[in-house]
Amino acid sequence: MPLGSAHRLVPEATFIDPDPDADRGAAEAVFEALGRSSPSLAGTSDPSAASFGFFEVGIDGLEPLWGAEPRLIERAGAALRGALPGEPSPRAGIAGTRFAASVAALAATPDGPIIVPPGGEAAFLADRPSGLLTTDPDVRARLTRFGLRRIGAVAVLPRSALIARFGEEGARLHARARGEETEPFGARHATERLALALPIEPPVEELEPLRFVLHRLVAALAAQLTGRGLAADRAVLTLELDLAFAPVGTSPRMEVEQRFPEPTADPEAVERLLFARLERQPPPAAVQRIDLELRGTTPAAGQQLPLFVPQAARTARLGWQLARLALTYGEDRIRRVAITDPEAPLAEARWAWRSVGLADDGRDGWPA
């Protein structure tokens, strides 16, 4: 809703600007923490997804390793408290089907999980609102009109009658209401994260020696990307500083996160962009260690070359040049034009200024 409407509804609230990158990082931290207990995880790290913040864990066969289900939930809760800031209070539910487990998690409280006994899914769901069976508002409204307000009332109907009224959705309604699995669990494929570090002895203050080390790190990680047919969309460069001769109050670490104009595995392009960032923001003290991590890996765009070697797309080189110009002269001085609504009645509403160097909107644009 508009911010003004939210202020009128809750005038005492504090409104915080969205930070998708921080939200995405928090979700990845949850996946990493839960992955220490189970290799079968499902969910999303996309903050714009409707299911963001909902995580599924496959626990079949884990009892001999971690103990009974309550013990496993305690272990998962302790892992989340170590992975997330503040005092997170996750709600957990365990059942034999994904739908029943989801409803159990929704009905649980931070004080205790809900564990549905094996074979008890239909009985557990019987008194729940029938609107939980589907996300389609039209189907929900029709269930209410037919007097089917509880899941148990849907479960006792013949499957053929529900299919006649709701089509394929009726078959899913019937199966969910009876505690049957409708969507087999599909484990999430974890995002590839490649990292490498090198110590520097003795520590150096000049940028050129740093570039030599940076070149080695980028080349090694880019080779890993190319060998796996992947491309990264951002890099995180961490410098550990030697504070022996540094001013008082200097932080012992300096972290630089740089997004790429496009996913790439080109070591030269990555090195130039990172070094331009260091030229703009030099380290405040001598550097004794460099850590480089490439994140946001995706399958590289293939080109039909000899042996069909997958390579990152090379069609957006202009974006890399604009990103380097923005680092040199300031992002507030370099902009690009993006088409937002070509059908807008007013000409000025058909386009908008966008920042460069960050592929944030996925639209094509032109430099200006």
Image (spheres, rainbow, N blue to C red):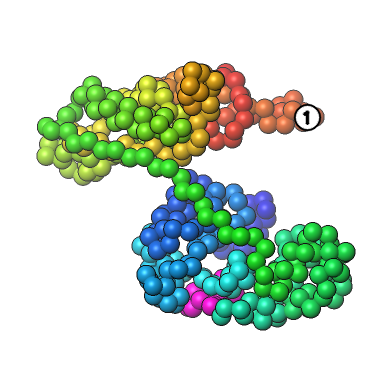
Say which residue label 1 marks. Answer: 343
Does residue 107 appear to the left or right of 249 in the view shown? right
Q: Is residue 241 left or right of residue 232?
A: left
State the image coordinates of residue 55 (x, y, percent, origin top left): 52, 60
State which quadrant residue 71 falls in: bottom left
The spot of residue 104 in percent (x, y) is 59, 73
Residue 181 location (% of width, % of height): 65, 66
Quarter of image, res 196 = top left
Report if residue 179 is visible in the image. Answer: yes
Between 49 and 249, the residue placed more toward the observer is 49
* Res 31 → quadrant: bottom left
On screen, residue 88 above or below 314: below
Q: Is residue 114 magenta?
A: yes
Q: Nearer the viewer, residue 76 or 65?
A: 65
Secondary element at tag 1: loop
Q: Is residue 187 left or right of residue 88?
A: right
Badge 1 density bin: few <14, some 14–19, many ≥20, Cα 10 Å: few
Q: Is residue 366 above or below residue 34?
A: above
Q: Position of residue 300 (x, y in %)?
A: 50, 31
Report the front residue among 350 and 72: 72
For residue 172, side relative to residue 25 (left or right):
right
- Magenta highlight range: 105-116
